[in-house]
Image (cartoon, rainbow, N blue to C red):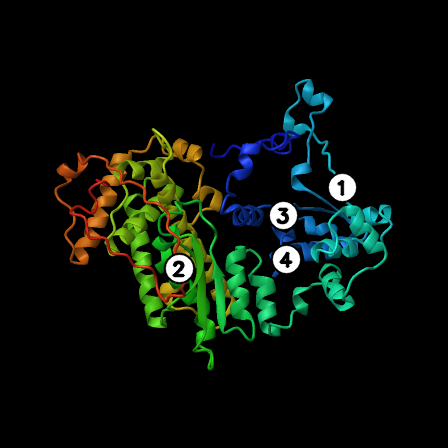
Amino acid sequence: MDGQYLPPAAIFQSEPTISAFHSVPPAPFIVPAVLDALSRSKYAKFTSVVPGEAEVYCASAARKNGGIILSNDSDLYVHDLGTGAFVYLDSVEMPPSKDSQQGAKSEDCKLIELRLNCPRDIAKRLGLSNLQELAYQFARGYSQTLPEAIKAAKKHQWDDETSFNSFAQEYIKETLISSIKYFSPEALARLSIQSQFLDPRISELVYQLESKDCHIAEAYLLCLIEDPCRSSAWLVSSGQRTFAYSICALPRKRKVGSENLKIEECNRRGQDFIMQEISLLTEPEIVAYANSSNKRIQKITDTFSEIPINLTWRIYALFEVYRWYLNTDRTPSARELLKSALTGMTHPRLTWETTHLSAQIQAVLYSLRMIHQILVYIASATAEALPTSLRELATTLEKLPSLAQLMPSPLELASQTANLDIESVLHRLAMILQNEADRDGLSVIDTSEELLNAPMEYSPRKKCKKSKKKKKKGAEMISKGKPNNMFEMLM
């Protein structure tokens, strides 16, 4: 529940993971959530986000200073760790001590068991100078079994010495951000100071745009847990991300000779993934979008001021999801699904509709986080002041809570909304959406008395179809005809 944490002994336990859990998809936001938690902890000054592969930097530190690396990356067997070692995260155990068995609290247990993997020692026991030669045998398919590979490695059997040296260099080189030649000294200074707690996917984009020769930057979205037979849940926040990318590209676009800069986003289209060019906004369009976004956020926060801030942001995300339905003429989710999205309760069962709506809400919330992080970076990394509307939006988005609070588990959400009047929330949200529709010249809601009694309906789930791999410009737009009552299920 909110504010309660598992004791260390419950996390580092010796029982293996239940086999049925191996097929469960990974949590999409686990990496940025961990970085978020570290940035707010006493370990912030010891934490860095680096370009490329993190294990290269960890291996370099272990080689120079010794120590133990906690990681599940088996590539560390091949790295030169010197006298250092690495430990698989799932092998860390905190067994109960005699004191804990006699009634002491589990958090008082100080004994931790680690299963060390020392590449240098392993190579020595196998009669090898290092494990790069052994790994090369398997990587190039020269050997099928471990005894064969060991025998070949001892005889230095490989067809191309240049190829082997290139392979081995990846695991013994010293990689420092200051040695990367793609960046100017000014860009390196900005990156080393300002990018430390950008989420990895955001920092990837920033590093590309800061490099000297980048003309096409690529952005990769996290894989959400969504209905694969429907359009990507990220579509509902495509406008927000276009805005974020446009801000990120703003300093480069202002430079002479960078007018042709492009940003492409990798997203799911059916059962495939495609690179889609983003139509970047002009500076006046950026300012206008910032103003309208600020007004919408302010409207939601003022209307629901009595609700905890993390729930207010969730309501705002649902508001943006419905705005997307309105603007693309699509049928919105059923009212009971909306209640489930706000309360975490999935009675009578968890459905693909509930899962997809939850993913859409996450897409909006994370896109807001992207906007905030990019605004903070651009504001601190450029000498020229940002327009007032962007500075105001950055101030508004400072209220975003941590990822763990922004995207609670269903159980946490159920606890947080136990005393919340969901009917009132949905009614007020419908009124705000009606005002949006009226402002845009749409009339989509009948009397609220009729809508409050509207039945819940489910549409049959369509079979997945493989889409053709095509590179298209702009967002996917599918028109299915406007329902008579756009917010019928909401009310």
How busy is the neighbourhood of tag 3: few (under 14 within 10 Å), some, or many (20 plus)? Answer: few
Viewer-side label of 3, 4: 4
Q: Nearer the viewer, residue 124 or 95?
A: 124
Vertically, is 70 above or below 7? below
Q: What label does residue 116 carry, if any?
A: 1
Q: Is residue 174 visible?
A: no
Tell me which residue sits at (14%, 52%) in the image: 443
Q: Check disc 4 and report the residue beneath it.
A: 53
Q: Check disc 3 and report the residue beneath it.
A: 43
Q: CA distance from mark 1 to mark 3?
A: 24 Å
Tell me which residue sits at (32%, 33%) in the image: 420
Please tell me whether mark 3 sits on a helix, a strand or a loop: loop
Q: Looking at the image, is mark 2 or mark 1 earlier in the sequence?
A: 1
Image marks 3 and 4: residues in contact by CB distance under 8 Å: no
Q: Looking at the image, is mark 1 or mark 4 earlier in the sequence?
A: 4
Say left or right for 155 vs 259. right
Please tell me whether mark 2 sits on a helix, a strand or a loop: loop
